[in-house]
Amino acid sequence: AIASDDLVFPGFFELSLRVVWWIGILTLYLMHRGKLDCTGGALLSSYLIVLLVLLAIIICTVAAITCVSMKGTICNPGPRKSMSKLLYLRLALFLPEMVWASLGAAWIADDVQCDKTVVNGIIATVVISWVIIVSTVVTIIIVFDPLGGKMAPYPSAGPNHLDSRESSQLLNGLKTAATSVWETRIKLLCCCIGKDDHTRVAFSSTAELFSTYFSDTDLVPSDIAAGLTLLHQQQDNIRNSQEPDEVISHSPGPPQEADLDTELANCHHYMQFAAAAYGWPLYVYRNPFTGLCKIGGDCCRSRTTDYDLVGGDRLHCHFGSILHTTGLQYRDFIHISFHDKVYELPFLVALDHRKESVVVAVRGTMSLQDILTDLSAESETLNLECGVQDCSAHKGISQAARYVYQRLVNDGILSQAFSIAPEYRLVVVGHSLGAGAAALLALMLRSSYPQVRCYAFSPPRGLLSKSLYEYSKTFIVSLVLGKDVIPRLSVTNLEDLKKRILRVIAHCNKPKYQILLHGCWYELFGGSPENFPTELDGGTQGDLTQPLLGEQSLLSHGSPTYSFSSDSPLESPTKYPPLYPPGRIIHLEEEGTAGRFCRSAARYSARWSHESQFSKILIGPKMLTDHMPDILMKALDSVVSGQAGYAFCPPGGGSNVDVV
C-alpha cells in the first residue's frame, strides 16, 4: 500500500537518525577506545568497528533510496525503476544488522568488566538497532497489501490486452479477492461489536463497496492525499479567477423571503432536539468545563420516579444532558432509547409545547455500528403508499428508519404521545445519519400522519431516488453548512471524486513529496494556489510511461469525460444508482474569510439552494468541521440572531457554487 515515491519522508527520517547514530558511535569509539583493554573489551571494540562499517553502508543505501524516490512523478515512475533493487539491497542489509544486534546483546549480557560509559553506550546502540528493526517489520506488516501481486502479470496495460472473456474473468477474480480482503479487514477493525445477522450483512455490504471503489485503480493513500491537495488548490484557483459578474444574484419576492425566515427559525429551534439525541458526549464536548458538573448528578444518582415516567432504555447519563440541551421537563418526554446496533439507531420522542409538536429525534453517527449502517450504500426499494413509482433509497439508512418506525408504531409510542396531545403535529428531526433516517421515517409516516414535517440537518446526499427527492420537497427541509462533505457524499460523487483525483495527478508534473509539502503549507497557512494545468496536453502523454489502471481511457483519449467499463458495479442501475438529498435545501455560507480554522468571528448568510449545488465534493480545511453539530448550531445562532444578512436565490435556481 505504498508507492516508490512514498519513501522520501521515511527515508529522510531514517537517514537523519542513522547519521546521528553513526556520529555518536564514532565519537564513543574515538573517545573511549583506550578504555577497551578490559575483559571482553576486544569483542566490544570489534562490535563498534563492524557496526560503524555496517551503518555506513546502510546510510549510503538509504540515501540512494531517498534520492531515487524524489525522482519522477506519480504517473511517471520510470526514473524510479531502480527502486526495487535498492529495496532488496536494503532488505538484505537487515540480516547482518539483526545478527550483529543479537551478538551485541549477547556480549553485553556476559558481565563485561569495562568502563561504564562505554558499556552504556553500546547498550544504547543495541537497543536502537532492535527498535529500528522491529519498527520496520511492523511497518511492513501494516502497509503490506495482499492484493498487491494480483496485477503483477499486467503491469503496464492491465487486463485491456486480453480478450473480453479473459478480461471479465480477471476482473471478477480481482473483485472477489478484494472483497474478501476488505471483509477480513473490517471484521478485525469491528471485532467487538457482535456477529448477528445485521452485522454480517453490513460487513459484506461495506467490503463490496470498498472493493468496488478501489479495485480499478492503482492508488495508494499518499496518492489520494496528493490528489486532494491538488484539487483543493485547483478549486481555489478557479474561484479566485472568477470575475465578479460571473455570479448571478437573485432577488426573490417577499413570500419566499418570509418562508426562509420561518424555516430558519424552525431549524434553529429543532436543531436542539437533533443535538440532544447524541446524549452526554456531545453535551460535554460543547461544554468542556461545566458539562460534567451539570450532568454529574444524573450519572451518579439512582433512578427517580421522574425517570420512571419516561419509557426507554440505557439512559444512564444521557437524560440529564437531554434536559439541559432541550430545556424541557421530565414529563415532556415520552420515550428515550439509546439501544445501538447495526441498522438500529437511538432516538427520543418528546412533547414540544412551544411549537405544539410531537418531536421524534434520531441520533447521528456515534459508533462503529453506525458507521457500518452508513457504509451499507446499496439501493433498496421502499414499500411506501405515496404514489411515487421509483421508491428506492440508501439500504442501511432505510433499514435504520424502518427499525425506528416499527418501534414508534408497533410499541405504541406515537399513540401514547398523541393521546396526551392530540392537537399537536408530528415533527421528525436528526443530524447526519440521523437526518437521513429522519427523512425516510417521515416518508414512512406520511400516510398515517399527513401533516408530518421533517428537518434534516447535514443529511447525506446519497439517500433518495430522484422521484422521492421531488416528492419530499413538500414536507422536508434540509440544512447544510458551508463545504460540509456529508451532504455531498454519495457513491456517484465519490466515483466522480476518484476520476478527478486520477485526472489531476496525471496532469501534474511535480514529484509527490513537493505536492505534499506545498499542500501542508497551503492548508495550514494559506498562500497562492499552484496554477496546475487543467487539461492533459498531447505532448505529455509520452512521459506517462506506466499510467494508472483507472486512468486508461482518459490517457488514451485525452478527455476528462472518461467512464468505466459497463462491467463496473458502480455503473449498475440497480446496485448504486444516483441518489439525492431529501427535501428543499437551505445552505448556510460563510461570508468573507474569518480564518482557515478560526470561527470566532465567522458570519453566515442563508439561501435556498438546488440539489445540483451539492453534486460535487468540495475540498477544504472545513469540509469535515462544517459537519460537526456544535459548529452548525453556532452558525444557526449567528444567522437567526441577525448577526449576518441574508442572500436569497430561488430554490430551483441554477448553481453558482465553484466546483472542479
Image (spheres, helix red, strand yellow):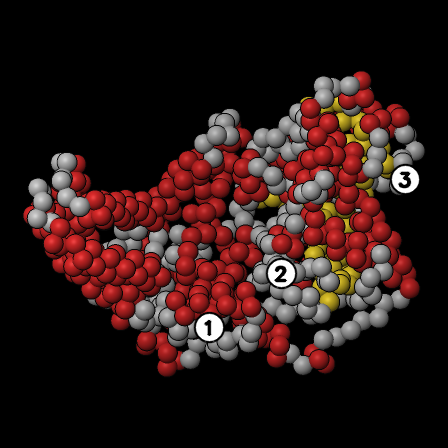
Residue at 68%, 39% (x, y): give it.
284
Q: Find residue 140 and report its horizontal and vertical position in percent.
A: 30, 48
Seen from the viewer's position, the closer of residues 564 and 582 is 582
For marks 2 and 3 on the same chain, the one whose residue lies earlier in the sequence: 3
Q: Where is mark 2, residue-wise?
A: 597
Q: Where is mark 3, residue-wise?
A: 354
Residue at 65%, 52% (x, y): give it.
627
Do the residues bearing badges 2 and 1 touch, measured as CB atoms within 8 Å? Answer: no
For marks 1 and 3, give the CA distance. 57 Å
Q: Find residue 171 and report its horizontal and vertical position in percent.
A: 35, 51
Q: Amino acid at mark 2?
A: Phe
Do the residues bearing badges 1 and 3 touch, measured as CB atoms within 8 Å? Answer: no
Seen from the viewer's position, the closer of residues 183 and 482 is 482
Residue at 35%, 43% (x, y): give it.
177
Q: Find residue 569 and report its horizontal and vertical position in percent.
A: 47, 50
Query: Which secondary structure, mark 1?
Result: loop
Query: Which secondary structure, mark 2?
Result: loop
Q: Amino acid at mark 3?
A: Arg
Q: Please tell me how crowded label 1 is: few (under 14), some (14-19), or many (20+) other residues with Cα within 10 Å.
A: few
For marks 2 and 1 on the same chain, the one whose residue lies earlier in the sequence: 1
Q: Nearer the viewer, mark 2 or mark 1?
A: 2
**Can residue 477 be seen at all in this image of the molecule?**
yes
Q: Where is mark 1, residue-wise?
A: 559
Q: What label does residue 617 carry, if any?
A: none
For marks 1 and 3 on the same chain, the one whose residue lies earlier in the sequence: 3
Residue 418, placed above or below residue 76: above
Seen from the viewer's position, the closer of residues 603 and 354 is 603
* Tag count: 3
Q: Nearer the viewer, mark 2 or mark 3?
A: 2
Q: Quadrant of the C terminus?
A: bottom right
Lateral position of residue 426 relative to residue 81, left or right: right
Residue 422, placed above or below residue 389: above
